[in-house]
Amino acid sequence: MAKRKTKSNPSLSPPPPSHFPWPLSSSPPLATAATICLFSLLVRVMVSLGPYSGQGVPPKFGDYEAQRHWMEITLHLPPSDWYRNSSHNDLLYWGLDYPPLSAYQSRVHGLILNASLPESVALRSSRGFESHASKLLMRWTVLLSDLAVFFPAALYFLWAYSQSNFGEKRAIMWLLAMILLNPCLVLIDHGHFQYNCISLGLTLGAVAAILLNNDVVGSILFTLAMNHKQMSLYYAPAFFGHLLGKCFKRNYSILHVMKLGFVVLATFAFVWWPYIHSTEALFEVVFRLAPFERGIYEDYVANFWCSTSVFIKWKRLFTVEPLKLMSLSLTVLTFLPSLVQQVKYPSNLGFLYALMNSSFSFFLFSFQVHEKSILLPVLPASLLALQEPQLYSWLTYYSLFSMYPLICRDKLLLQYIASLGLFLLVFYSPDRAHSGVNRSRLYYKNLIWFVPLLGSVVLHAVYLLVKPPEKYPYLFEALMMLLSFSQFVFFTLYSNIKQWKLSWYASGKKDL
């Protein structure tokens, strides 16, 4: 008598073995999430023990002094004078150049410093103030901002991700670690010294809300992100295209568009209330947010304008006006395909790709981009880490590499090596192949990937050990910039193709 074959029930099968330090379960355990958050906080604390931007380097010091100075200005002057040149507010000395929400944040932090160390934010007399106590207080303001905004937003996104139809979710705790332990954000905020955790946290919360179909909440949070740092505009085409596409799929689509438009305008009015009563005051703020007089680029940023300036001297050939037009045209042309795809075929996964594509288009082609702006494409890449693990790891590596000269100037080399090593250690955890993390087709073991990787490793050492030729004092920075730019262009093309493949699936041209 033949034995009857029994079908095994996959749901009853034991989970694959893993050496991850977190369980691979469908619902993230609270204790594991708390452990990852506490460890991520510890990493930030350790990085913050090091130097900061401009430490002991007069006359303008660095970003640390800029943030401290804004606390001083917003604490002692009325809002009408925050963006206006005066005897108490010299705009040539770190004039406030972020939107009003960032100014309100500076005032709150200024109140904290004033309560504990008033001489550190005294009007005019505190310029260049540096002490161990002030450093400790300033570092704590960034840590508290991270804990208050970015960490809750990451957990909120994790919940939204677990509710979305993204496929495998057994490694969702790994995804949380990838978001919180990204070395780019940790080094810039807690090493170099900035508050990107607030604007990026608000954006992350907005993404989570939209994944959960809370479009009104998402619109409010993203509007707040744009009003904290104007660079959040990098994500605007993705938000606009996705929300517009969702509205078109509903009944009474015009009413849905009007509702979201009203929410955005009301949020802007709330944040800008001290300035909307006067045209002069309004334009004073707007002028500070668009520093076209600085030129199309500064320093050595791995975008199109700076990288191609090795061969084409843009600043010599063109004045600011035609450069603004060219920059705007190229930026719109590069994010337009991604925007159109989301208007026609809105999807949660497509929205995450669109966030990366639109932010890359701004980073590569917009006017006056800083090397730290690479943080904006890195955020959506971290949200796609389960779908595109290799893209995320390589983008993180080359993003760090593109900021390597900046990190060296801040004397944060030890923190750079340690945070990158920790990130790679967590990323390449044992048995990752069994963890549910998708295998990306991006990475192949061939010369296309090995040559730039080898070049970056060599440049790391050369930059520290070899003196550049006198005729080309910034030769090594230029080589790093060109190498990083080539990788960013590839990542942009790859991500746009992946996003448009989703529309092929949606239209039935390909099987899922």
Image (cartoon, rainbow, N blue to C red):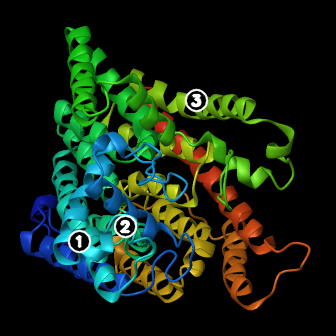
Amino acid at pointer 3: Val
Q: Above or below — where is 485 with respect to 325?
A: below
Q: Residue at x 9, y 64 (%)?
A: 12
User: Are the residues at dot 1 and dot 2 in contact (C-beta closer than 8 Å)?
Assistant: yes
Residue sitting nearer the eye, 159 or 465: 465
Q: Position of residue 103 (x, y in %)?
A: 32, 50
Q: Which residue extends farthest right?
A: 471
Q: Residue at x 26, y 57 (%)?
A: 75
Q: Which mark is residue 68?
A: 2
Q: Position of residue 282 (x, y in %)?
A: 39, 29
Dot 1 corresponds to which residue?
113
Q: Above or below — where is 93 with respect to 357?
A: below
**Element at label 2:** helix
Q: Residue at x 37, y 46 (%)?
A: 82
Amino acid at pointer 2: Arg
Mark 1 or 3: in front is: 1
The number of callouts visible is 3
Q: Which mark is residue 332?
A: 3
Label 1 environment density (alpha carbons within 10 Å; few <14, some 14–19, many ≥20): many
Q: Which mark is residue 413?
A: none
For this view, does 341 lie left or right of residue 195?
right
Amino acid at pointer 1: Leu
Residue sitting nearer the eye, 87 or 193: 87
Label 3 environment density (alpha carbons within 10 Å; few <14, some 14–19, many ≥20): some
Of callouts 1 and 2, which one flags the residue occurring earlier in the amino acid sequence? 2
Of callouts 3 and 2, which one flags the residue occurring earlier in the amino acid sequence? 2
For this view, does 497 lie left or right of residue 78?
right
Q: Residue at x 51, y 55 (%)?
A: 373
